[in-house]
Amino acid sequence: MKVFIADDHPIVTFGVAGLIRQNAHMELAGTAASSAELMDALPDARPNVLLLDLNMPGDDFSLNVQMIKEQFPWLKVIAYTQYCEPDLIRRLLREGVLGFLPKASTKEDLYEAITTVYKGERYVHNSVSFAEPGASKELPKFQDDFRKRLGLSKREQEILELISKGLTSNLIGQTLFISKHTVETHRKNILRKLDFNSSTELVRFAVQQGLV
Protein backbone atom coordinates (compact mmCIF):
# COMPACT_ATOMS: atom_id res chain seq x y z
CA MET A 1 0.00 0.00 0.00
CA LYS A 2 1.60 3.23 -1.18
CA VAL A 3 0.65 6.08 1.15
CA PHE A 4 1.10 9.80 0.49
CA ILE A 5 0.95 12.41 3.31
CA ALA A 6 -0.30 15.95 2.64
CA ASP A 7 0.14 18.10 5.75
CA ASP A 8 1.83 21.43 6.40
CA HIS A 9 2.97 20.56 9.93
CA PRO A 10 6.46 18.99 9.65
CA ILE A 11 6.29 17.20 12.98
CA VAL A 12 2.98 15.54 12.01
CA THR A 13 4.38 14.45 8.67
CA PHE A 14 7.55 13.15 10.31
CA GLY A 15 5.61 11.13 12.89
CA VAL A 16 3.11 9.60 10.48
CA ALA A 17 5.83 8.83 7.94
CA GLY A 18 7.71 6.94 10.64
CA LEU A 19 4.64 4.85 11.45
CA ILE A 20 4.09 4.00 7.80
CA ARG A 21 7.71 2.92 7.41
CA GLN A 22 7.29 0.62 10.42
CA ASN A 23 4.49 -1.28 8.70
CA ALA A 24 5.80 -4.02 6.41
CA HIS A 25 2.70 -3.79 4.22
CA MET A 26 2.97 -0.04 3.62
CA GLU A 27 5.29 2.23 1.67
CA LEU A 28 5.68 6.01 1.94
CA ALA A 29 5.02 7.36 -1.56
CA GLY A 30 5.80 10.99 -0.72
CA THR A 31 4.83 14.10 1.23
CA ALA A 32 3.54 17.59 0.45
CA ALA A 33 3.03 20.72 2.56
CA SER A 34 0.60 22.58 0.28
CA SER A 35 -2.05 21.86 -2.32
CA ALA A 36 0.31 22.98 -5.09
CA GLU A 37 3.05 20.57 -3.93
CA LEU A 38 0.47 17.81 -3.66
CA MET A 39 -0.87 18.18 -7.18
CA ASP A 40 2.65 18.41 -8.59
CA ALA A 41 3.81 15.26 -6.80
CA LEU A 42 0.86 12.89 -7.34
CA PRO A 43 1.46 12.05 -11.04
CA ASP A 44 4.90 10.59 -10.31
CA ALA A 45 4.23 9.25 -6.81
CA ARG A 46 1.02 7.42 -7.83
CA PRO A 47 -0.01 6.43 -4.29
CA ASN A 48 -2.96 4.19 -3.46
CA VAL A 49 -3.98 6.13 -0.35
CA LEU A 50 -3.74 9.84 0.48
CA LEU A 51 -3.78 11.22 4.03
CA LEU A 52 -5.11 14.73 3.41
CA ASP A 53 -4.95 17.55 5.95
CA LEU A 54 -7.89 19.90 5.37
CA ASN A 55 -6.25 23.16 6.45
CA MET A 56 -3.18 23.48 4.21
CA PRO A 57 -1.81 26.49 2.30
CA GLY A 58 -3.24 26.79 -1.19
CA ASP A 59 -6.59 25.74 -2.57
CA ASP A 60 -9.68 25.10 -0.47
CA PHE A 61 -9.97 21.49 0.70
CA SER A 62 -13.13 20.94 -1.34
CA LEU A 63 -11.31 22.01 -4.48
CA ASN A 64 -8.40 19.73 -3.59
CA VAL A 65 -10.76 16.76 -3.26
CA GLN A 66 -12.52 17.65 -6.51
CA MET A 67 -9.25 17.89 -8.47
CA ILE A 68 -7.99 14.62 -6.99
CA LYS A 69 -11.19 12.78 -7.94
CA GLU A 70 -11.02 14.17 -11.48
CA GLN A 71 -7.29 13.70 -12.14
CA PHE A 72 -6.48 10.67 -9.98
CA PRO A 73 -9.71 8.63 -9.74
CA TRP A 74 -7.92 5.55 -8.41
CA LEU A 75 -6.64 7.42 -5.35
CA LYS A 76 -8.38 6.70 -2.02
CA VAL A 77 -8.55 9.81 0.18
CA ILE A 78 -8.56 9.88 3.97
CA ALA A 79 -9.31 13.23 5.60
CA TYR A 80 -6.72 13.47 8.40
CA THR A 81 -7.66 16.43 10.58
CA GLN A 82 -8.42 17.80 14.02
CA TYR A 83 -11.85 19.04 12.89
CA CYS A 84 -14.44 16.40 13.74
CA GLU A 85 -17.83 18.09 13.33
CA PRO A 86 -20.43 15.63 11.94
CA ASP A 87 -21.61 18.15 9.32
CA LEU A 88 -18.07 18.45 8.01
CA ILE A 89 -17.62 14.68 7.85
CA ARG A 90 -20.91 14.21 5.99
CA ARG A 91 -19.83 16.87 3.51
CA LEU A 92 -16.45 15.20 2.96
CA LEU A 93 -18.05 11.81 2.37
CA ARG A 94 -20.49 13.33 -0.13
CA GLU A 95 -17.60 14.96 -1.99
CA GLY A 96 -15.76 11.67 -2.45
CA VAL A 97 -13.52 11.28 0.59
CA LEU A 98 -13.50 7.61 1.56
CA GLY A 99 -12.09 7.83 5.08
CA PHE A 100 -12.06 10.13 8.09
CA LEU A 101 -9.34 9.93 10.74
CA PRO A 102 -8.85 12.44 13.61
CA LYS A 103 -5.25 13.49 14.29
CA ALA A 104 -5.61 12.29 17.88
CA SER A 105 -5.95 8.69 16.64
CA THR A 106 -3.64 5.83 17.60
CA LYS A 107 -1.15 3.97 15.43
CA GLU A 108 -3.60 1.08 15.20
CA ASP A 109 -6.33 3.45 14.03
CA LEU A 110 -4.01 4.80 11.33
CA TYR A 111 -3.21 1.32 10.03
CA GLU A 112 -6.87 0.30 10.11
CA ALA A 113 -7.97 3.43 8.22
CA ILE A 114 -5.35 2.97 5.49
CA THR A 115 -6.05 -0.74 5.08
CA THR A 116 -9.83 -0.22 4.99
CA VAL A 117 -9.88 2.49 2.33
CA TYR A 118 -7.21 0.67 0.31
CA LYS A 119 -9.80 -2.10 -0.09
CA GLY A 120 -12.30 0.48 -1.35
CA GLU A 121 -14.33 0.45 1.86
CA ARG A 122 -15.45 3.51 3.83
CA TYR A 123 -13.74 4.26 7.13
CA VAL A 124 -14.98 6.70 9.78
CA HIS A 125 -13.22 6.67 13.15
CA ASN A 126 -15.36 5.27 15.95
CA SER A 127 -15.00 8.46 18.00
CA VAL A 128 -17.33 10.22 15.56
CA SER A 129 -20.93 10.39 16.71
CA PHE A 130 -23.45 11.50 14.10
CA ALA A 131 -26.56 13.23 15.39
CA GLU A 132 -29.89 11.72 14.46
CA PRO A 133 -31.29 13.22 11.25
CA GLY A 134 -33.33 16.30 12.12
CA ALA A 135 -31.96 16.51 15.66
CA SER A 136 -30.42 19.89 14.92
CA LYS A 137 -30.95 22.12 11.93
CA GLU A 138 -28.19 24.57 12.83
CA LEU A 139 -24.53 24.37 11.91
CA PRO A 140 -22.12 24.10 14.82
CA LYS A 141 -20.68 27.39 16.06
CA PHE A 142 -17.14 27.44 14.72
CA GLN A 143 -14.55 28.83 17.09
CA ASP A 144 -11.56 29.64 14.84
CA ASP A 145 -11.12 31.06 11.35
CA PHE A 146 -10.94 27.69 9.60
CA ARG A 147 -14.07 26.51 11.40
CA LYS A 148 -15.81 29.73 10.37
CA ARG A 149 -14.76 29.10 6.79
CA LEU A 150 -16.31 25.63 6.92
CA GLY A 151 -19.63 27.30 7.68
CA LEU A 152 -19.65 28.98 4.25
CA SER A 153 -21.20 27.28 1.25
CA LYS A 154 -19.18 26.79 -1.95
CA ARG A 155 -21.00 29.71 -3.57
CA GLU A 156 -20.31 31.94 -0.56
CA GLN A 157 -16.61 31.06 -0.70
CA GLU A 158 -16.55 31.93 -4.41
CA ILE A 159 -18.16 35.29 -3.71
CA LEU A 160 -15.82 35.96 -0.77
CA GLU A 161 -12.84 35.34 -3.04
CA LEU A 162 -14.16 37.76 -5.66
CA ILE A 163 -14.98 40.40 -3.04
CA SER A 164 -11.43 40.18 -1.74
CA LYS A 165 -10.15 40.74 -5.29
CA GLY A 166 -11.98 44.06 -5.38
CA LEU A 167 -14.87 43.14 -7.67
CA THR A 168 -18.14 45.02 -7.29
CA SER A 169 -21.44 43.23 -6.83
CA ASN A 170 -22.27 43.89 -10.49
CA LEU A 171 -19.01 42.34 -11.69
CA ILE A 172 -19.37 39.38 -9.33
CA GLY A 173 -22.86 38.79 -10.68
CA GLN A 174 -21.61 38.88 -14.26
CA THR A 175 -18.74 36.52 -13.42
CA LEU A 176 -20.97 33.97 -11.70
CA PHE A 177 -24.04 34.53 -13.93
CA ILE A 178 -26.25 35.58 -11.02
CA SER A 179 -28.05 38.85 -10.23
CA LYS A 180 -26.62 41.75 -8.25
CA HIS A 181 -29.38 41.21 -5.70
CA THR A 182 -28.31 37.58 -5.22
CA VAL A 183 -24.71 38.69 -4.72
CA GLU A 184 -25.77 41.23 -2.09
CA THR A 185 -27.80 38.57 -0.29
CA HIS A 186 -24.80 36.24 -0.23
CA ARG A 187 -22.60 39.10 1.02
CA LYS A 188 -24.95 39.73 3.95
CA ASN A 189 -25.01 36.01 4.79
CA ILE A 190 -21.21 35.83 4.68
CA LEU A 191 -20.88 38.81 7.02
CA ARG A 192 -23.40 37.24 9.39
CA LYS A 193 -21.76 33.81 9.40
CA LEU A 194 -18.27 35.22 9.94
CA ASP A 195 -19.52 37.79 12.47
CA PHE A 196 -17.98 40.68 10.50
CA ASN A 197 -19.29 44.17 9.82
CA SER A 198 -17.36 45.34 6.75
CA SER A 199 -15.81 44.25 3.45
CA THR A 200 -12.40 45.18 4.87
CA GLU A 201 -12.76 42.41 7.44
CA LEU A 202 -13.80 40.01 4.68
CA VAL A 203 -10.70 40.80 2.64
CA ARG A 204 -8.42 40.34 5.65
CA PHE A 205 -10.07 37.01 6.44
CA ALA A 206 -9.75 35.80 2.82
CA VAL A 207 -6.06 36.66 2.76
CA GLN A 208 -5.44 34.89 6.08
CA GLN A 209 -7.23 31.80 4.78
CA GLY A 210 -5.25 31.73 1.52
CA LEU A 211 -8.30 32.30 -0.67
CA VAL A 212 -6.49 35.08 -2.55
Image: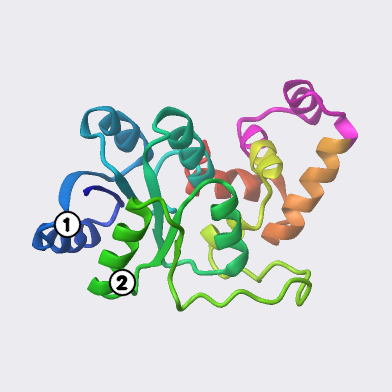
SS of the residue under disc 2: helix
Rendered position, 66 above or below 27: above
Q: Residue at x 40, y 49 (%)?
A: 77
Could you tell me which secondary element the residue under label 1 belongs to? Answer: helix
Residue 80's label in the rendered image is none
Q: Closer to the observer: label 2 or label 1?
A: 2
Q: Amino acid at mark 2?
A: Asp
Regarding residue 52, the answer to whether it shows in the image is: no
Residue 209 appears at what percent x and percent y? 50, 48
- Number of labels in the image equals 2
Q: Residue at x 60, y 43 (%)?
A: 203
Tell me where residue 183 appears, x and y as whole percent: 81, 36
Coordinates of residue 110 in the picture (x, y in percent): 28, 66
For label 1, count other residues whose C-alpha is less than 10 Å away and answer few (under 14), some (14-19) or many (20+).
some
Q: Which residue appears farthest toward the right when viewing the image?
A: 181
Residue bounds of the magenta highlight: 161-181
Q: Residues within 10 Å of mark 2 (few under 14, many from 20)?
A: some
Q: Which residue is mark 1?
A: 17
Left or right: residue 130 versus residue 106 is right
How far is disc 2 from disc 1 in space, using C-alphas? 15 Å
Q: Is residue 159 left or right of residue 108?
A: right
Q: First in sequence, mark 2 or 1: give its number.
A: 1
Q: Amino acid at mark 1?
A: Ala
In the image shown, does 197 or 170 lie closer to the viewer? Answer: 170
Residue at 15% across / 49% down in the picture? 27
Q: Position of residue 157 (x, y in %)?
A: 64, 43
Question: From the viewer's perspective, is residue 157 above or below residue 103?
Answer: above
Query: Residue 35 lies in what quarter of the image?
Result: top left
Which residue occupies 42% across, 39% down? 58
Along the viewing direction, whichever of 46 and 15 lies nearer the viewer: 46
Identify the residue position indicated by label 2 in the image: 109
Q: Is residue 166 covered in magenta?
A: yes
